[in-house]
Structures are given as C-alpha cells and as structure tokens.
Amino acid sequence: MTEKKTKTKTVNIRNKRASFDYLLVDKYTAGLVLTGTEIKSIRAGKASLVDTFCFIHNGEVWVKNMYVAEYFYGSYNNHSARRDRKLLLNRKEIRKLQQSTKTPGFTLVPTLLFIDENGRAKLDIYLCRGKKEYDKRQTLKEKEDRREMDRQFKKY
C-alpha cells in the first residue's frame, strides 16, 4: 500500500503590530464564520490582520476590518474584502470578554489567523491593554538588547 503524501502549506497570518502597541493579557482561540470563497482565499494566504479589532454586539463577538482578498476564480458568489465576520466562542468566554472590555483601557485584538489540523480557519484573539509611549520605548530597547546579546553569543 502506498500512502498518499499530503503537501500542506501552513497558513499563519500575523498581526505584528499588536504586540508592540498592546500588552497582551488573555488569549482566546475562536472559529470564524466564512463563505466558501473566503476560506479559499485564506488557504491561499491572501488575508491580512492590519488594523483589525474585535467587538461584542448582542452577545456575539465580531471581527471588523479583516482583509480577505476576493477569490480569483469566484464569480458572482465572491465576498466583499472587508466585511464584518462573526467569531465562534462559548457563551462563558463571551460573557467574560464582555465584562473585561467594559473596564477602561482593555480591548480585543486579533493576533494570528491560521488553519487548524481539521482544515478550519481559526483566529487567536487577545484581551489587551494599550501601551503608553514609554512602554513602547522600553519594548524596543529590550528587543535591541536581545539582538545585541545574540550577536555577541554567535561570535564565540
């Protein structure tokens, strides 16, 4: 018997700006409600999380401003690129997020869009607190120090 080799391309679309602008507090993994052409575009890697955020409306969590390119082979069935998409979370998680976001300074930010082992699109969202300017400078300094230490370590 010959086993079928499956060549899977991993899809990991990151929001790199989120960890710089926010202090990441709590992580949640949510499913996405997508149309057929949207999942095909995501599997092709044609999506972006730049300037995206999540909000809670009527007990449902939504992601706003997430870019998913129109599918090339999609005809009149194609989706709009920046529509609001519903996230799938448990009621308990949604209630907890709703209470947390009511406190000032906290928000929900998506950080990673990926395809799980079952072929479903998932989104990692974090409960975040905004960083001040001096926190951002501290983060840059730590990153620069780590890079310098790695350079010194590689010499020896």
Image (cartoon, rainbow, N blue to C red):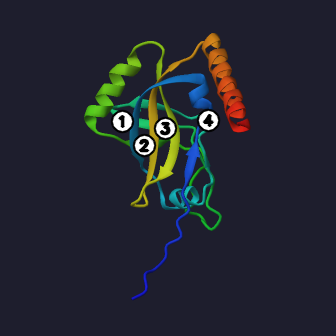
Residue beneath the point at 50% across and 36% down = 110
Indicate the secondary structure of the residue bearing disc 3.
Answer: strand
| Location of residue 125 (image quadrant) | top left
The extreme bottom residue here reads 1
Quadrant for the N terminus, please.
bottom left
In front of the other: 109 or 152: 152
First in residue order: circle 4 vs circle 2:
4
* Residue at mark 1: 60
Q: Which mark is residue 63?
A: 3
Q: Can you give x and y, in whole percent of width and height, for residue 73 in the image?
A: 63, 68
Quadrant for the C terminus, please.
top right
Q: Is residue 78 left or right of residue 148?
A: left
* Residue at mark 2: 86
Residue beneath the point at 43% across and 81% down = 3
Say if mark 1 contacts mark 2, CB within 8 Å.
Answer: yes
Indicate the secondary structure of the residue bearing disc 4.
Answer: helix
First in residue order: circle 3 vs circle 4:
4
Q: Which mark is residue 16?
A: 4
Q: Which amino acid does label 4 sit on?
A: Lys
| Location of residue 90 (image quadrant) | top left
Cα separation, mark 3 vs mark 4, equals 17 Å
Total labels: the figure holds 4
